[in-house]
Image (spheres, coloured by chain):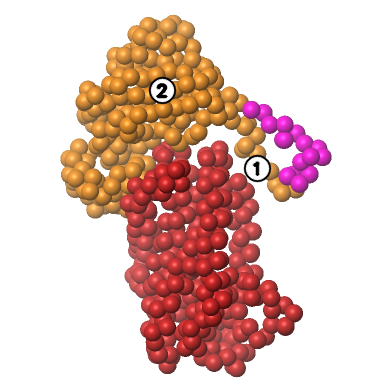
Chain colours: A orange, B red
Amino acid sequence: MVTVENVGIEFNLNRGKVRTLKEKLFAKVNDETSSNTMFKALDNISFNVVKGEIFGIIGGNGAGKSTLLKILAGIMKPTAGTVQVKGSIAPMIELGTGFDFELSALENIYLSGSILGYDKEFIDSKVIDIFNFSELWDFKNVPVKYFSSGMVARLAFSISTIVVPDVLIVDEILSVGDMAFQKRSYERMVELMKSGTTVIYVSHDVNTLSEMCSRVMWLDKGNIKMIGDARAVCEKFISCLA
Amino acid sequence: MNLIRRILSIKKYKFMLLQLIKRDFKVRYRGSILGVLWSVLNPLLNMIVLSIVFGQVFKAVDNYKMYLLSGLLIFNFFSEGTNLGLTSVVSNFGLLTKVYFPKVVLPLSKVFSSSINFFMSMIAFFIISVFMGIEMWWGYIFIIYLVITLILFTSGISFILATLQVFMRDIQHLYSVLIVIWMYGTPIIYPIDVIPENYLFIYKVNPLYIFITFLREITLYNSIPQLSNFVLCALWGLGVFVLGAIVFVRSQNKFIYYT
């Protein structure tokens, strides 16, 4: 389903420094900024995920997990290597993609849904499910700016998980809403996974990963440190932290 | 091949484009009592102010109020569309880093929502022109041609500005000065006759002047614009649109590194 070959990506560490016109013009004369310091966020990453597999990714902060997800979702283009994804892909990198807080819950379902690439008929057919799952019927026409953050998260999660994509990319989003909703969202995730969707799941939570995933990849500073059976990788990861 | 695939992928996001335009429209008038009427009132009030100030100076111009309004109609649309288009990518970085979609949707949605405003103002323009003693005739049909080429031109400029703004945030400030220069450099509030002969060529190549002349020929002077005017409208519209699209598409993959 997902094949990643020799993927690497480099960032220019100086890109944050906005150069004024003057600096640009006289850059050749005395220049520290032009000697670009390149930073390899990912280096020579290769793996493949088969259909129906739940594939976990762990690693410390700055290991390159989110960057890898962005490459898989097509948001970033790698500077080296190739990525192949068969079928539709739904990135859940952030909840509430494209929400406009001035608009009502119903309007936001259409807005957010359209940004995720769904058409009108599809969203029409899912509106009822979304409101049922998020339990926000009473707030259908209320602008989202008056919602509590938990309510926003519930609405967002319901929109994101309403479809069954071929490949689902999840970046730690289960911890939204109150306890009851957390439980239901966890169940919904399991349900999605059982329905044959291929899942790529990034988390810091080693317990959930070893429980849910079949294989786990451990990223460290942009390199694959270990890849294989979920339990084995997770144990190694914990022992390394201790 | 690649181009066909691109166009197809945009078609898939037609609904997104529609939703973004709808959003702009809703948010724009939310909480205002007169709502959409402001699209009509704004250019009208603008015209009244300017005609009070300059009406005495340019007494010689026939039907000065309509002369002014026709210029403002075109220029306001261009100015609004490009200004919104300029920030369209930068203000949506939150989206760009979270989900994949054809980025060209962003500036396009802004130009289209300005177009809706433009249509409203245009209807107002026609109504007022009847009161001002201008009769509609079959030549008005060519205004459709003008609108299409003008929207293409505005989109093209928006693509270029949106791209530049990502790499250099100075563009926004530069453009706000440029648009004022452009406004006073275009015969909107004054007639072209006041320009000395040797500077005339600068005015003749100004695309906005070409578009405005096209409208004035039809509405104010009851004549069909010259063939050269038709050709120039198409050249500017299509040319800038294609150029802008190339610039935008070529650099869109780099956008994400400049958030």
Residue A68 is at least partly visible in this image: yes
Near-viewer residue (B170 or B82):
B82
- On whether residue A24 falls in the magenta region, the answer is yes
Given this view, does label 2 or label 1 mark the residue nearer the observer?
Answer: 2
Residue A3: mark in rendering: 2
**Which chain's residue wears label 2?**
A
The spot of residue A158 in percent (x, y) is 26, 37
- Up/down of A194 relative to B46, above or below: above
Label the magenta part by its dominant secondary structure.
loop
From the viewer's perspective, is B189 left or right of A168?
right
- On whether residue B131 falls in the magenta region, the answer is no
Q: Residue at x 23, y 45 (%)?
A: A122
Q: Residues within 10 Å of mark 2 (few under 14, many from 20)?
A: some
Residue A147 is at least partly visible in this image: no
The spot of residue B160 in percent (x, y) is 56, 54
The spot of residue B158 in percent (x, y) is 53, 58
Residue type at numbered disc 1: Val
From the viewer's perspective, is B49 left or right of A183?
right
User: In which quadrant of the rendered view does residue A72 lie?
Assistant: top left
Q: Are marks 2 and 1 on the same chain?
A: yes
Q: Residue at x 30, y 19 (%)?
A: A53
Q: Residues within 10 Å of mark 1 (few under 14, many from 20)?
A: few
Residue type at numbered disc 2: Thr
- Up/down of B236 relative to A104, above or below: below
What SS does tag 1 mark? loop
Residue under circle 1?
A18
The spot of residue A188 in percent (x, y) is 23, 28
Region in magenta: A23-38
**Which chain's residue wears label 1?**
A
Q: Residue at x 40, y 90 (%)?
A: B135
From the viewer's perspective, is A35 left or right of B75?
right
Task: Give the CA separation, mark 2 to mark 1.
Answer: 36 Å
